[in-house]
Image (spheres, grey):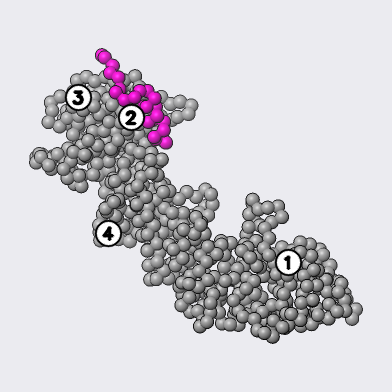
Amino acid sequence: MRVKQFKAESKRLLELMINSIYSNREIFLRELISNASDAIDKLYYRSLSEGITGLRREDFYIRLDVDKEARTLTITDNGCGMSKEELESNLGTIAKSGTLQFKEGMEQKEDIDIIGQFGVGFYSAFMVSEAVAVVSRAFGSDEAWRWESKGVEGYTIEPAEKDGHGTTVILKIRKDSDDEDYSQYLDKYRLRSIVKKYSDYIRYPILMDFEKTVPKEGAEGEYDTVTETETVNSMVPLWKRNKNELSDEDYHSFYKDKFFDYEKPLRVIHSSGEGAATYNALLFIPGRAPLNYYSREYEKGLQLYASGVLIMEKCPDLLPDHFSFVRGLVDSQDLSLNISREMLQQDRRLKIIAQRIEKKIKSELALMLEKERETYEKFYKNFGLQLKYGLYSDFGIHKETLRDLILFYSSTEKKMVTLSEYVGRMKEGQKFIYYACGDSVDKIDKLPQTEVVRDKGYEILYCTDDIDEFALRMLHEYDGKEFKSVSAGDIGIETSDEDKKQAEESKDLLDAMTAALDGKVKAVRLSERLKTHPVCIISEGALSLEMEKVLSSMPNAPENGVKAERILEINKSHPVFPVLAGLHKEDPEKLKEYTKLLYTQALLIEGMPIEDPVEFTNAVCKLMAEAKGR
């Protein structure tokens, strides 16, 4: 029998399709089942458009059969079938698609949803097969034909026998090798799991025979082995059903089964879109963060389906990083099944879908914040950190999306508040939104730098996460109000003339203390923010003390760390100040010792490391001994 050559470019093209387009071999079954579904769709469409009687939707099926001894896997459908010419045209030319031509020729394209478009998927069968045969009989024809190929060498085509219309694809599965277990594709239970993964929502039943052991009638304790035909796919996707038909339990069960979570989701988002991109989306906001969520191992992404057929288990392009906690899926008939991930990234419709999903998630979170505050705070406890990372990342391009979703603990409300709520409570004449940074709420409560701000009755936002100040700096302002750290050099509270005069009179003392610290601080100043504490450290410039701590702790930080411009502030009203003034005149060396002690004390209050703990301990002991001597 004469072997015909493929009309497309050759062995190299087939090798590229098999090895590059598809990243794992199990995809072949998805492709062949999708082709079978297309064939049934075509015939069903013809029955509607041409008024063909005797064809009922419930009579269509796809069937999988396994012969382990012969090492064959057979996929059968009762769709439109192919004539000899169609076999040669569609299978003899790589990347020639009868489905695409059919779809382009339909008058009412919206009435039927066809999966394949590029004609590439069929050849994925050669990833697992040493030979592929296709026996097909076109609807309305008395003739059947057998197309057969062993791959790049070409193909043969000859008359065949077949009962009824449709197509049968017979795969001669390869023998196992050291690297590949091809026999798994002869295991019915493995095949069923692949169907459930990729083709669970094909609209026609996918049938398989399974042997089962049942009690033997009339013989207690004895059993018979019987063969039962099962439908192994669900057929109707949950996300394509009317929302009014679904209960919370339906959604929650689907989520737990599909995404392997024992806890129900906090929010279900069931939406769809039409126009430039048609899609259905079923999204879930989890009730807890996965253990690896804030690690490099976590992979974001939504399941991506094309007309109910799984294209990608996790499509990262559908979710922005700041909403990476969302789980779920997107199903679109506008996306082609037979395209690689690289092509998906360039797909304009995919980008449109991603933009709409981002807006939908944002609106649902805003609604939860407004209507279900307790639920939102539970969500925020798990994923609020990710929202704040989103504020800071990508040079702040997402801040308009996220700024109304973030929460901070309030010094006055003693609970989490939004920026909008803070601004709505601002005192008359208050110019800034004040914040303070620290490891915990308790530690921030005790910070000396907060005293004057509290004394004015101003609310303070507590920043307890490393990212917080970076995010607020990126925001810069909210509703026209600039953010201001209580540890900033200028906190926007005016200095009285009397205070200015005292600072001028104390200039020599402050200069002497600055010199004593030998470059550790930019300056020593009298403080306008301290009321009861003797001393504190503040910073000037773009880098704050909290930023210094965060950046210095990073793995790639400079050897000597990152340094903020430090200012040591002294409380002029504290009993220690006249002691310092007296030492400046009577004992300059003792003033140096006291200055170093106060500086180290300020570092400890701020939660910053001290350079020489032993020196500090000895200085304290020396001071105690001198006090006893007096």
Q: CA distance from mark 2 to mark 4?
A: 39 Å
Please name the residue shown 19% across and 46% down the image: 111
**Residue 494 higher or lower than 566, as above or below:** below
**Which residue position holds label 3?**
84
Q: CA distance from mark 3 to mark 2?
A: 18 Å
**Which residue position holds label 2?**
123
Which of pointers 2 and 1 indicates the residue nearer the eye?
A: 1
Magenta-highlighted residues = 1-24
Is residue 75 one of those drawn in magenta? no
Q: CA distance from mark 1 to mark 4?
A: 64 Å
Dot 3 or dot 1: first in sequence order is 3
In front of the other: 626 or 60: 626
In front of the other: 143 or 83: 83
> Label for residue 521?
1
* Residue 536 visible (yes or no): yes
Which of pointers 2 and 4 indicates the residue nearer the eye?
A: 2
Circle 4 SS class: helix
Circle 3 SS class: helix
State yes or no: discs 1 and 4 in contact (Cβ < 8 Å).
no
Residue 72 in percent (x, y) is at 32, 27
**Which residue position holds label 4?**
243
Q: Quadrant of the C terminus?
A: bottom right
Local crowd size for mark 1, using a 10 Å CA cut-off: few (<14), some (14–19), many (≥20): many
Residue 570 in percent (x, y) is at 73, 76
Q: Please name the amino acid that badge 2 sits on.
A: Tyr
Is residue 7 one of those drawn in magenta? yes
Dot 2 or dot 4: first in sequence order is 2
